[in-house]
Image (cartoon, rainbow, N blue to C red):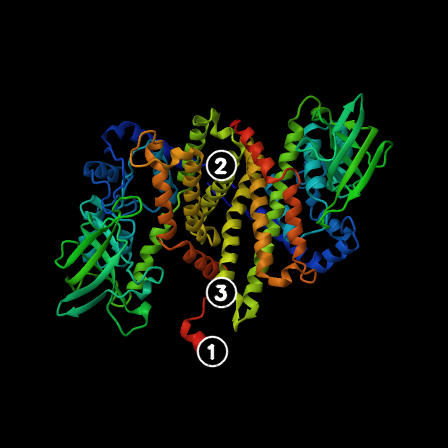
Amino acid sequence: MDFALSEEQRMLQDSISGYLESGCPLTRVREVAEEREDRADDIWNELTNLGVHGVLVDEDYGGVGLGHLEASLIAEALGNAVAPVPYVASSIMAPTALAAAGSDEQKEAWLPRIAGGEVVVGVGVSEQIGRRETEGVSSTDGKLNGKAMFVLDGASADVLIIASDDGALHLVDPNGPGVTRNKLKTIDRTRTVAEVVLDGAVGDVLPGSIDDREPLLTTIDVGRVILAADTLGAAQSMLDTSVDYAKERRQFNRVIGSFQAVKHMCAEMAAELEPCRSLVWYTAHAYSAIPEEGRLMACHAKAHLAEVGKFVARKSTEVHGGMGITDLLGLHYWFKRIGFNRQLLGAPELVRAEAARVQEWV
Amino acid sequence: MDLEYSPEYRAFRDEVRDFLEENKHRAPNQTRMIPGRPNSAKGWQQLLIEHGYAARTIPKEYGGYGAEPDILKTRIIAEEFARARVPPGHSGDNRLVPTVLELGTEEQKQWLVPPSVRGEMTWCQGYSEPGSGSDLASLSTKAELDGDEWVINGQKIWTSGAQNADMMFCLVRTEPDAPKHNGISYLVFSMDTPGIEVRPLVSMMGDAFFNEVFFTDVRVPKDQIIGKRGEGWFVANTTLRYERGGLGDPNEAENRLNRIVDMMKRETVSGERLIDNPIYRDRLLKLQGQILAMKFNGMRVLSHNIKGEEPGMARWIVKLNGCELNHQMAGLAIDVLGELGLLYDGSDYLRDGGFWQARYMLDLGLIIGGGTAQIQKNMIGERALGLPKEPKVEEARARA
């Protein structure tokens, strides 16, 4: 019995964080955000070299074939650095969907290219969690019609995986006939979402997802775990920044961290956030090792991190006083990243309602 | 991450289970914990010690079982006793006994530990005073040396179980001119000593869990001091460390949550099951997420402890979060019961024997006791996050 990261997992964490510290400073994040670029190519490429995009891809397909805990540790590091690169959909949800439901041909076509950082895959499953501004996506005779909203990592993705209302997953060429893609502007400029209008578009269905919702649900679960881990990293950064600031900033001849009002805000953030680390670790581990608990834990990790992330984002901003809300300080990149993670793949109330169904309470 | 138990521990769990299956009919019927009076069914305690399920790591020469410390086995014992709903054994007093074993003289160990372990010598803790709660080190109950005896005068408060205990371990000021942390000594004495008066302090729950204890010229032999004169604060911190280790069992919290789930499936309002009310249900689910997070945090702390590592922040937050969650759980249970939630005192229609109503009040007390939530936040801020202490009033005045 050892509830802890292995030596290898700590090394992975250190190597990703170590790179991001130098390769993804706030100045670089700001450039990408201000230029409204869809991703930072330099960071993307270096992450490719570190094996990030192939973390869940089997070695047979050119990946490194690690587990969900490793994938979460990477997400945590990316969230910590507010790294402006696709990850949750392209590197995690897409390979999950392909592995769960793809044909050999589809896997061979896409998994090595995902692992090699050659393609970005957008994933559109929001309609299957909660439809807004769309009547959904229908699939008849190989033709897709309707609109997929909030397609994750979707703005300049080379290929999309879109879920139709029957739960089937389809590979869709965003530049193919009958497909219109429109990038949506969000609060967070470090990741992208798109709306995708389908008008008789031809999809390449993942055969394992026909008449079986499980691949879709698994894809959503894993995405939720990764968003939770991203929030964990981002919130930890906000707490650390707050504590550093509270040790430096002086008012009334004292550093403000010596005032209980400020100290207690920091302590409350820490008290809320620290157990989240264990929740994310357990959830990610469970998803690989204790499958019967995976779905419930994914719901709880997603919902709980959304709540704690929101709390930390708000308190951290307050600790920084007026500077907290300025663009100059840049704290808002973390604030917005946490906000983005909260709403996507089910806001907490919806995800908790699902947790009740998973437990057969209702 | 390895959440499996190795064969050695699986075998140990089986052994505990078999023991309980075979012997639980001999266990005393214990419905309510009385502080200062560990389960006094001595035959049962003796049987548990013989098998290593009580006083496990206390050396044999002091009446214990004499096993090497093994945190996981201790945990397994606790889990299996809880599962079998059998009263666990004790190790004398989990604050006093480890302190004496660590800092007491050989005579003190022989005198105090074996009868405590047998349940023949029970303890209460004389720390807090009316004027010294969170600022415990400012305590003013004084002890002056007169020949071979300490003479104690003053008052303690919040003394759990003082009305039943045989003995008290007590912090007193022996060096009035020393800085406050360096002027305290740690004395032990019988509650039958002349000059001690115990007055029950009735709580909002209607019981006298706590007491006030008054000392008037209480004479205690000079050698009944643990550690050196003036070092009582540091001796007490040894004790507090042991006490803190015992707070907030996340498995217990999860069991309690499951009781609420069962109740919400069973109880109805206007014919609708409580769990079908989306607002009640969402509150329940929110708590479930928090409790799971604390459960896994507990597993992480346990793993650090097993390896002899300092768990850091994961440990500092346990008391604050654990007590708060327990209180919120009781609050939810009462709210979902609506008007039924205000019944009390064995009333008709009372649910769960009034457990939730009592817990709601008791758990608020536990948020305050053993270091208030605000003191916990100071400790998290200062010791774990490294934020500076509040400047002393004198310093602030000098600067102004």
N-terminal of the pair, mark 1 or mark 2, is: 2
The amino acid beneath tag 2 is Leu
Q: CA distance from mark 1 to mark 3?
A: 16 Å
Q: Residues within 10 Å of mark 2 (few under 14, many from 20)?
A: many
Q: CA distance from mark 1 to mark 2?
A: 51 Å
- Left/right placement of residue A313 relative to residue A143 reads left
> Looking at the image, which is closer to me, B79 or B280?
B280
Q: Is residue A254 above or below residue A79?
A: below
- Left/right placement of residue B394 relative to residue B286 reads left
Marks counted in the figure total: 3
User: Is mark 1 in CB contact (under 8 Å) with mark 3?
Assistant: no
Q: CA distance from mark 3 to mark 2?
A: 35 Å
- What chain does badge 2 belong to? B
- Left/right placement of residue B118 relative to residue A178 reads left
Which percent across, then down, holds residue A161?
Answer: 75, 33
> Looking at the image, which is closer to me, B161 or A105?
B161
The amino acid beneath tag 1 is Arg
Residue in the picture at 43% in, 47% down: B324
**Can residue B211 be seen from the camera position used here?**
yes
The disc at residue B284 is 2
The local secondary structure at tag 3 comes to loop
Q: Residues within 10 Å of mark 1 (few under 14, many from 20)?
A: few
Q: Which residue is mark 1?
A: B399
The disc at residue B384 is none
Q: Which residue is mark 3?
A: A259
The local secondary structure at tag 1 comes to helix
Q: Toward which corner of the image does residue B21 lie, by quadrant?
A: top left
User: Is mark 3 in CB contact (under 8 Å) with mark 2?
Assistant: no
Which percent across, then down, holds residue A342?
Answer: 63, 44
Residue in the picture at 52% in, 73% down: A253
Which percent across, then down, holds residue A307?
Answer: 57, 45
Residue in the picture at 20% in, 57% down: B108
